[in-house]
Amino acid sequence: MANPEEGDHATGRRSQARVWLVPAVVVSLLMALLATMYLAYVVDPSKHLHGFPIALVDQDTGDVLGGQPTNVGKQISDALVQQIPSDKIDLRALGINEAQHELSSGNVYGAIVIPSDFTKRLGIFATASVVPGDVSQPIITVYTNPRTGSFSPQVVQTVAGGALARANQTVGERLTETVRTQLQSSGGGQAPELVGLSRLMLAKPIDVVVTPFHPLPAGTGGGLTAFFYTMMVLLAGFTGAMVINGMVDSSLGFAPTEFGPWYVHYPPTPISRLRTLLLKWAIITGTAPVVAAIFMGVAHWLGMPIDRPLVLFLYSTFAIIAVGVTALSIVSALGTAGMLINLILFIVLGLPSSGGTIPIEALPNSVARLADFEPMHQVYLGIRAILYFNADGAAGLSRASWMTLLGLAIGLSLGAIITRYYDRKELHRAPTAAR
């Protein structure tokens, strides 16, 4: 015959384990996921480069060097294509107008531009090494695109700088040999030595100029304001939804309202799950434009430039509503566990895959794939396009708008269908006896 006391002790142990063990395990797993996601994307971005887009513009028309028709620009561009690893860098051969358009839309992170008179200037520079006269080094310009983020210009400079340094050395060796051959021909078979300064000039004849394309104005945090504004919008939707959920449930009597050591537990209100969710949706929808206006007011007060204020206000409001509605639907469907799901969906997985600090093309593939659907990346594309690219749809605003609309539709459908199902099954919000 079973001993009742042993059964009570076993029940007590299970109850104690539920009190302390389950929360400890959940928090530990959540922090493990957070550490993995956050450190994976920031430890070594250059190691994870894949498909990083850089434009290559070769305008050189060529000239005659050493009595031979030559196009050094084409030689350099061909060498760049061979030297720059295609599995890491997407080097796109474009015309100058197309490259400028891609830079203006944020579709490439930088551009290497070889001017039309490059070979001609190289020949003049070679001649100036032995003939007196004014001369300037031939230039190759590397444009960075600071509006695509604070980290991408560093990658462009590293990749382009390393490749062009090798090209500069190769061109210098060939140019030095050409000048020596010409001197030998004019000197009656003897090859006079080049003076030290001439050798130094010819060794690295190309002046590589790195300059930003459409530099960011003051007050943009070096390209970080779009990312932090995105964080504000996501937190407004996510955190706002959690606050609204808790306060509405307390007011309707489904949870106690606590004030320090005191609390009030109102009698439960006879209201369906669907109507409760509709009430919460209405509150977040009404609050969103107020919060969006507050964000813009604070940004203006701090001197942050906003060239398209109406578009920023409308999209921020839209994004806050979409995130808030979806977060409320998840909590309504899953209860307390929904808060954890929301945290993972909108923050833990969203921040490293947003592309706001490190480009998507410099993230591990497992993290980069999250950007296809993660809300924070979609919102970031929209905010960045509005703040830095004159609200250009091609710069990400079109995708952001459609993805935000899709997220809102999913949130509305999920919440309405599940709460309606609960109501039809008479799964009312009432205490359940503990087992």
Image (spheres, rainbow, N blue to C red):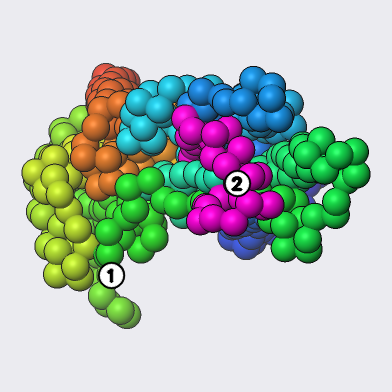
Q: Which residues are magenta?
A: 110-137
Q: Which mark is residue 258?
A: 1
The answer for how far apart the CA atoms under marks 1 and 2 are is 80 Å
In the displayed structure image, the side of residue 338 where residue 389 appears, left or right: left
Residue 214 image offset from top left, x and y in percent = 32, 47
- For mark 1, does the 10 Å Cα neighbourhood hold few (<14), some (14 to 19), or many (20 or more) residues? few
Q: Amino acid under label 1?
A: Glu
Per the image, is 127 magenta? Answer: yes
Residue 308 image offset from top left, x and y in percent = 13, 45
Q: Nearer the viewer, residue 360 or 38?
A: 360
Q: Is residue 214 above or below residue 322?
A: below
Residue at the spot x=78%, y=61% of the render?
195
Report the quarter where the C terminus lies.
top right
Q: Which mark is residue 125?
A: 2
Q: Nearer the viewer, residue 362 or 64?
A: 64
Q: Nearer the viewer, mark 1 or mark 2?
A: 2
